[in-house]
Amino acid sequence: MKLKDFLLEDKTITENPDAQLREAEMLMMKRVLPALEDFEKACAIIEKRMGNAMFPGFKAAMHKAIVSSVKQKRNKVLDTDFIERMMVDYFDR
């Protein structure tokens, strides 16, 4: 399951705070962390293909896009559409 699909999934966690924390931990371990590991592997492939000269700029642009996405005043933890638009702008310049 992709991180975007996980974030858009419309399941509510039970009302018990301890159960909420356990379920959030389980979801984090089973879904979010594997998605982040896939992201890390993809970035490593991009780094190998871009080389040392170009990768720092890509990394900075990606970092800025992710941080800006998190700071957006929306109901999402991470707005992948926003990140995509920022990265398209980076590649188009």
Image (cartoon, rainbow, N blue to C red):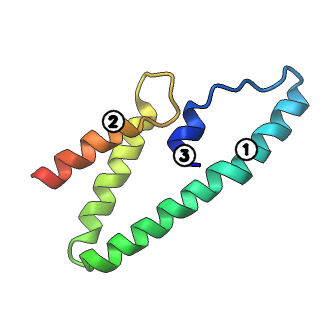
Across and down, in percent, residue 63 comes to 37, 52
Which amino acid, by three-letter code, is at mark 3? Leu
Across and down, in percent, residue 52 comes to 27, 79
Q: CA distance from mark 1 to mark 3?
A: 11 Å
- Nearer-N-terminus badge (2/1): 1
Q: Nearer the viewer, mark 2 or mark 3?
A: 3
Tell me the crowding category of disc 3: few under 14, some 14 to 19, or many 20 or more residues within 10 angstroms, Cα based.
Answer: some
Task: Check residue 52 in the rendering and tell me which mark sits there, or answer none.
Answer: none
Across and down, in percent, residue 2 comes to 54, 48
Task: Tell me the element at label 3.
Answer: helix
Give the tally of numbered discs. Answer: 3
What residue appears at the point 57 percent right and 35 percent down from the top-left corner? 7
43 left or right of 27 in image: left
Which residue matches tag 3? 3
What residue appears at the point 34 percent right and 74 percent down from the top-left corner? 47
Which residue matches tag 1? 27
| Placement of 60 over or under 47, stated as above or below | above
| Placement of 28 over or under 77, stated as above or below | below
Which amino acid, by three-letter code, is at mark 2? Phe
- Nearer-N-terminus badge (2/3): 3
Q: CA distance from mark 2 to mark 3?
A: 15 Å
Task: Check residue 82 in the rendering and tell me which mark sits there, or answer none.
Answer: 2
User: Which is nearer the eye, 10 or 66?
Assistant: 10
Tell me the crowding category of disc 1: few under 14, some 14 to 19, or many 20 or more residues within 10 angstroms, Cα based.
Answer: few
91 left or right of 79 in image: left
Q: Are marks 2 and 3 in contact (CB under 8 Å)?
A: no
- Nearer-N-terminus badge (1/3): 3
Task: Tell me the element at label 1.
Answer: helix
Q: Name the quadrant containing residue 53.
A: bottom left
Task: Tell me the element at label 2.
Answer: helix
